[in-house]
C-alpha cells in the first residue's frame, strides 16, 4: 500500500528531527525560552490554518464518514492541542495568550502551510491535500513515541507532558488520513501517486524546517516600510 511507502519515506525525517536541537533540547530540558516562544507563536497560527484546511476539505468530500472525521479533527485542533502548547508555555513562565499574541508567519511556517493550501485549492481529490497534511500528526506521534521509548522522563520533567500528549492523542488522526490516501490511490495513475508521495515527503521536510526555524528564531528580512 502507498501508506506503507509514505511511512518508510518519513523514517529518515523522524530520525533527523529527533536528533536536531529542538527535540534534544526538550529531552535534555536545556532548550532556550526564546526558541519555545518562537515555536509557540508560529504553531498557534499554523494550527489555526490547519483547521481552516480541514474546513475546506469538508466542502470537497462526499463521504459522511470523512466529514465527521474532519469536523472532529477541527474540534481537536481548536480545543485540544492547546494542552501541549500549555506545557511549553509553563516552562517559559508566561501566560500562553501573552506569548502567542505577537506571533507572525515566519518564512518556513509560511512555506509549509502554503504547500497544503496549494493542494487544497488546486486539486479536487482531497488525497492530495491529505498527503501534504499527514506528516503533521504522523511525525509528531513517532517523535513522541521514540522519545518515550528512549528516555525515562521523571515526574517533574518540564516537557514530559508534551511527549505524553503526542504519544497518546493523535495516532487515530494519522491512521484515518493514511486509509483515505490508500483508498484514493487505488484509482490513480503512477504520476498522481508520485505526486501524493512528493507532497508527503515535502511536508516531512517542512516539519524539520519548522522545528529548526524556532532554534534560529527565523524572521523575514526587515523591510523599511516607511520609504
Ligand atoms: C508544525 C506542526 N506539525 C505538527 C503538529 C502536530 O499537530 C503541530 N502542532 N505543529
Image: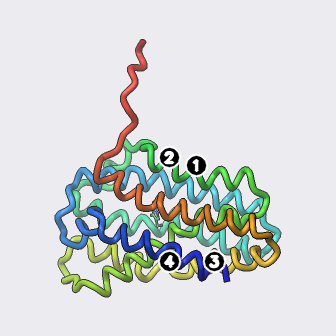
Measure how far apart labels 3 and 4 are at the Cα level: 13 Å
The percent position of residue 182, horizontal first and vertical second, equals 70, 79
In the image, what residue occupies the spot 36% across and 28% down? Answer: 222
> Residue 154, located in which quarter of the rendered image?
bottom left
With 96 as the anchor, is 51 left or right in this view? Answer: right
Q: Secondary structure at mark 3?
A: helix
- Mark number, residue 114: 1
Q: Nearer the viewer, mark 3 or mark 4?
A: 3
Colouring style: rainbow
Q: Earlier in the sequence, mark 2 or mark 3?
A: 2
Mark 2 residue crowding within 10 angstroms, few (<14) / some (14–19) / many (20+): some
The percent position of residue 59, horizontal first and vertical second, equals 77, 59
Measure how far apart labels 4 and 2 are at the Cα level: 23 Å
Mark 3 residue crowding within 10 angstroms, few (<14) / some (14–19) / many (20+): many
Measure how far apart labels 2 and 3 are at the Cα level: 24 Å
> Residue 193, located in which quarter of the rendered image?
bottom right
Quarter of the C terminus within the rendering: top left
In the image, what residue occupies the spot 21% across and 71% down? Answer: 158
What residue did someone put label 2 on? Answer: 110
What residue did someone put label 3 on? Answer: 178
Mark 4 residue crowding within 10 angstroms, few (<14) / some (14–19) / many (20+): some
The percent position of residue 65, horizontal first and vertical second, equals 74, 78
In the image, what residue occupies the spot 55% across and 65% down? Answer: 201
Q: Earlier in the sequence, mark 3 or mark 1?
A: 1
Mark 1 residue crowding within 10 angstroms, few (<14) / some (14–19) / many (20+): few
- Mark number, residue 170: 4
Measure how far apart labels 2 and 1 are at the Cα level: 6 Å
Q: Earlier in the sequence, mark 4 or mark 1?
A: 1
Amino acid at each position: 500500500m502507498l501508506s506503507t511507502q509514505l511511512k518508510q519515506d518519513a523514517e529518515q525525517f523522524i530520525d533527523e528531527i529527533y536528533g536536531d536541537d529542538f527535540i534534544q533540547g526538550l529531552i535534555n530540558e536545556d532548550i532556550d525560552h526564546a526558541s519555545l516562544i518562537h515555536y509557540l507563536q508560529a504553531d498557534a497560527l499554523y494550527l489555526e490554518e490547519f483547521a481552516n484546511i480541514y474546513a475546506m476539505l469538508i466542502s470537497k468530500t462526499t463521504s459522511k464518514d470523512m466529514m465527521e472525521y474532519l469536523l472532529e479533527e477541527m474540534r481537536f485542533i481548536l480545543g485540544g492541542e492547546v494542552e501541549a502548547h500549555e506545557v511549553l508555555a509553563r516552562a517559559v513562565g508566561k501566560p500562553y495568550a501573552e506569548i502567542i499574541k505577537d506571533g507572525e508567519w515566519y518564512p518556513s511556517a509560511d512555506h509549509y502551510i502554503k504547500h497544503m493550501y496549494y493542494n487544497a485549492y488546486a486539486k479536487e481529490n482531497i488525497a492530495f491535500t491529505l498527503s501534504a497534511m499527514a506528516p503533521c500528526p504522523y511525525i509528531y506521534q513517532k517523535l513522541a513515541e521514540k522519545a518515550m521509548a528512549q528516555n525515562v522522563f521523571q515526574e517533574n520533567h518540564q516537557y514530559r507532558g508534551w511527549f505524553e500528549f503526542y504519544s497518546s492523542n493523535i495516532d487515530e488522526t494519522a491512521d484515518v488520513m493514511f486509509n483515505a490516501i490508500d483508498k484514493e490511490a487505488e484509482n490513480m495513475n503512477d504520476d498522481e501517486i508520485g505526486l501524493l508521495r512528493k507532497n508527503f515527503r515535502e511536508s516531512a521536510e517542512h516539519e524539520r524546517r519548522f522545528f529548526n526555524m524556532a532554534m534560529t528564531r527565523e524572521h523575514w528580512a526587515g523591510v523599511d516600510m516607511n520609504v
